[in-house]
Image (spheres, helix red, strand yellow):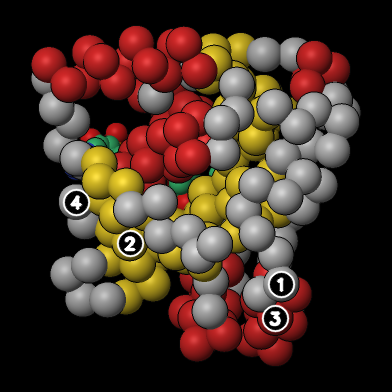
Amino acid sequence: MTARLDTERLIIRPLQLTDSSAVYDYRSNPEVVRYQMWRPESESDVRQFIREQLGLTPGMPGIWYQFGLVRKADNELIGDCGIHIPLEHTEAAELGMTLAQTSQRLGYATEAIVALLDYCFTSLGLLSVLARTEKRNMRSIALIRRMDFYPARAENFGLAEEEDELLFVMERPDWERRKAAQGRHPSPGGLFLNS
Ligand SMILES: CC(C)(COP(=O)(O)OP(=O)(O)OC[C@H]1O[C@@H](n2cnc3c(N)ncnc32)[C@H](O)[C@@H]1OP(=O)(O)O)[C@@H](O)C(=O)NCCC(=O)NCCS
């Protein structure tokens, strides 16, 4: 299955080898990757990573599946986002998100996370979605709070507790309530799912 999600301004689709240069550009910006594990040292590192992703499927437990975020207005790749289902807890997924610096603070991350939450709960049939962030990553914490995630314990989801990190969760019933409320007050991002 090729997963592709459409929002008002974005296409969320699997990373492709032709994305390597754009991904390397924003992921070699120290500001962007300050709180992140994956810091490729060259464009060829990115190509290798994307090659490895080509055989994977979103929803496979035990791997990070990475999507590209493409801005519809100019077809530019402006970031990536990942889904990880822990092997020890396959009813939950952890999300990650990285935007190029010039595409931050424009609502794209919020728009993408709405689509990813819906994908996790509706298409993948998961019960919980997790967001983990470093305690100092204020932009990430703001995004998580904007979405109404609430604090969670890592051990409840088969994840290791890290002293310098915070873990948050969204449960499916909370997401369904939020979606129903947004139906009455549509969000500026809008959401249209193809798969
Ligand atoms: C974490 C990260 C994804 C958050 O992204 P972000 O740009 O802050 O979030 P958004 O794209 O939703 O933008 C929100 C801002 O856009 C504004 N905005 C503008 N148009 C908007 C719209 N249509 N919808 C929602 N918000 C909108 C909001 O008011 C908000 O403004 P503020 O920053 O002044 O509060 C981003 O900072 C990032 O990529 N950081 C580097 C990588 C990283 O650390 N990732 C997290 C660890 S996995």
Is residue 27 left or right of 117 when viewed as pictured? right
**Callouts 1 and 4 close, C-beta under 8 Å:** no
Q: Residue at x 66, y 84 (%)?
A: 47
Specify the amino acid type for callout 4: Glu
Task: State yes or no: Cβ of the residue under disc 3 lies below 8 Å from any atom of ligand 1.
Answer: no
The amino acid type, in three-letter code, at marker 2 is Ile
First in residue order: circle 1 vs circle 4: 4
- Would residue 175 be found to the left or right of residue 159 on screen? left
Where is residue 86? Give x, y as percent: 79, 37
Q: How crowded is mark 4: few (under 14 residues within 10 Å), some or many (20 or more)?
A: some
**Residue that label 3 marks:** 51
Q: Which mark is residue 11?
A: 2
Q: Is residue 104 above or below residue 47?
A: above
Cβ–Cβ under 8 Å for marks 2 and 4? no
Is label 4 in a helix, a strand or a loop?
loop
Residue at the front extreme? 1
Of labels 3 and 4, earlier in sequence is 4
The picture places residue 164, in percent across and down from the top left corner, at 76, 29
Query: Going from the N terminus, do you reach mark 3 or mark 2 first?
Result: 2
Secondary structure type for disc 2: strand
- Quick one: quadrant of the N terminus? bottom right
Give the alpha-carbon distance from disc 1 to disc 4, as whole Å: 29 Å
- The residue beneath circle 1 is 55
Q: Regarding ligand 1, which quadrant of the image does it lie in?
A: top left
| Whether residue 20 is situated above or below residue 68 in the rendered picture | below
Residue 17 image offset from top left, x and y in percent: 57, 85
Residue of label 4: 8
Which residue is painted at 18% across and 30% down in the image? 187
Residue 135 screen position, x and y as percent: 64, 28
Q: Which of marks 2 and 1 is nearer the N terminus?
A: 2
Q: Can residue 140 be seen in this view?
A: no
